[in-house]
Amino acid sequence: MSNKKYDIIIVGGGVSGCAVAWKLSRYNLNVLLLEKEPDLASGTTKANTAIIHAGYNADPNKLKGRLNVKGNVEIKQIAKDLSIPFKEIGSLVVGVKGDDLSILDELLEKGKKNKVEGLKIVDKEWLRENEPHLTKDAEAALWAPTAGITTPWEFALAMAENAVANGVEIELETEVLDVLTEDGNVVGVKTNRGNFGANYVINAAGLYADDVARMVGIEKIEIRPRKGEYYIYDKAKDFDVNHVIFPIPTPISKGIVVTRTIENNLLIGPTSDPIDDKTDLSTTPEGLEKVYNGAKKLFPDLTLKDTIRVFAGLRAADKTEDFVIEAADNVHGFINVAGIQSPGLSSATAIADMTLDILEDEGLKLEEKKNVIEKREEPVRFYEMSNEERAKMVEKDKKYGKIICRCETVSYKEILDAIHGPIGARTVNAVKRRTRAGAGRCQGGFCGPRVLEILSEELGIDPTEVKQEETNSQIIEYKIKELLGSKVMDNA
Ligand SMILES: Cc1cc2nc3c(=O)[nH]c(=O)nc-3n(C[C@H](O)[C@H](O)[C@H](O)COP(=O)(O)OP(=O)(O)OC[C@H]3O[C@@H](n4cnc5c(N)ncnc54)[C@H](O)[C@@H]3O)c2cc1C
């Protein structure tokens, strides 16, 4: 056991764990966040639709309904304070010919119960004017002006960075293997890197939250992953979409969404298919066909010619189909933040507030810190700058003049900053999340090897040790010299 005893250990560095860490960093507490992977936000938080939902869709009697709106309202100020990309572009649930349009009224009523601001039903003419490429069969829609889009991993990383600035500690590649208890009280955790002591453990382990809950004997949480597959388009595409566009929802899914991303790529998806394997992030021909057909129903002119990538994310759906945020009743000091499926991103900060309330109820003293650092410095985003601004940056530091990712105009200096930042990038995907290097049209075909080389140089590790993402995802199998040496000669 490390000598230091923490007040709280958070298991899992997705948006939920990072939000809890961020909220706790405002108080005089020793907080440690443990993440099993080499980077934060590399679970479900990295692969979703990135919408901050308005909050009309979730059942007002469920936690999902109560917490979504609160999170949606909060994010506007948080985005300013922590320099998180956020655009309040509004969403539309579109009913087309043949759909049951009464569902729009039901959603409107649900939204009113959830206290969502500004909802109204709009007609054909409104839709034609505001979303010109939408199908001519669109009859009416529910307009929710407070819905927005964000960059989900940056949302999580920004909260984590600010938490670190305010004293929270983070350990990566540290997997919680067991929760330690004595006389019915939590006393710490066992990990692959030794034991850590704590009075409280927060289980924010996403897809694995049921496994972590079982470590203290809680059996009632059952996470069954629900896969969502997507296509993402290049910024150069046939037409723009101005809002987040949903079809009429089903009881378990909001349907195939067509939306723009913060950087103005087009994103279509997700499917909603229960699976058994928590690691299965594969895409399938059937899933992608469902995505394309669903999107074409809303936008008939859509083709696939400008798509640059397919991907999948897994919703951590509990059997209750709700968030499970509660203290364990069999062990003091263990709190579940489980079943955080959609709208988990939209609700993250409200989920964290609720977790702090539970901690207080469980006897934790929350004493506000003096001199909290409220702001996070905005990272340089070279691709957003004018040529004049870029020239000024290069004058300050020549490393800005060396462009590593041509598609997204990411400079050498930004990659160095990502590697040496407050939660430094150790993998190729971690660099991508922080800088967009590899997120463009060529998907890292050009910059990938160079990013690998920079990581190797800056971290002082052999290129064969550089990972794409998770533990054991090394990219180069053999050392170059071995390839050029005996192995190649042997095969000649
Ligand atoms: C297809 C899809 C679309 C979605 N769209 C939206 C949307 O548009 N808007 C919205 O609001 N929500 C959306 N969501 C939901 C949202 O993405 C999730 O609710 C949110 O990302 C969950 O975050 P989390 O931190 O709870 O889990 P995760 O991001 O999965 O984080 C859990 C972390 O715990 C770590 N971990 C697990 N076990 C251990 C262990 N034993 N020790 C240490 N670390 C461990 C994992 O490695 C992981 O990093 C969507 C989800 C999916 C799948």
Image: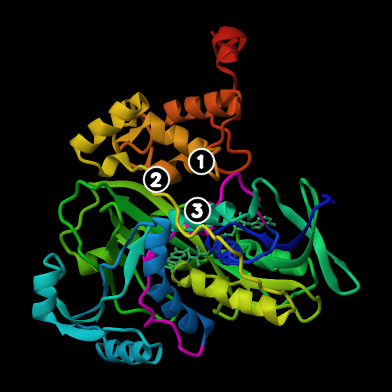
Q: Residues within 10 Å of mark 3 (few under 14, many from 20)?
A: many
Q: Which mark is residue 379?
A: 2
Q: Residues within 10 Å of mark 2 (few under 14, many from 20)?
A: some
What is the span of residues highlighted in magenta in the rendered image? 32-61
Query: Does residue 316 appear in the picture of this structure?
Result: yes
| Residue at x-position 46% and y-position 36% | 417
Q: Does the residue tagged 1 have its C-beta within 8 Å of any atom of ligand 1?
A: no
Image x and y of residue 352, in percent:
56, 71
Image x and y of residue 104, in percent:
28, 87
Q: Does the residue tagged 3 have its C-beta within 8 Å of any atom of ligand 1?
A: no
Q: Which mark is residue 157?
A: 3
Q: Which mark is residue 421?
A: 1
Compared with 485, 303 (above or below) is below
Q: Is residue 331 left or right of residue 393?
A: right
Q: CA distance from mark 1 to mark 3?
A: 11 Å
Q: CA distance from mark 1 to mark 2?
A: 10 Å
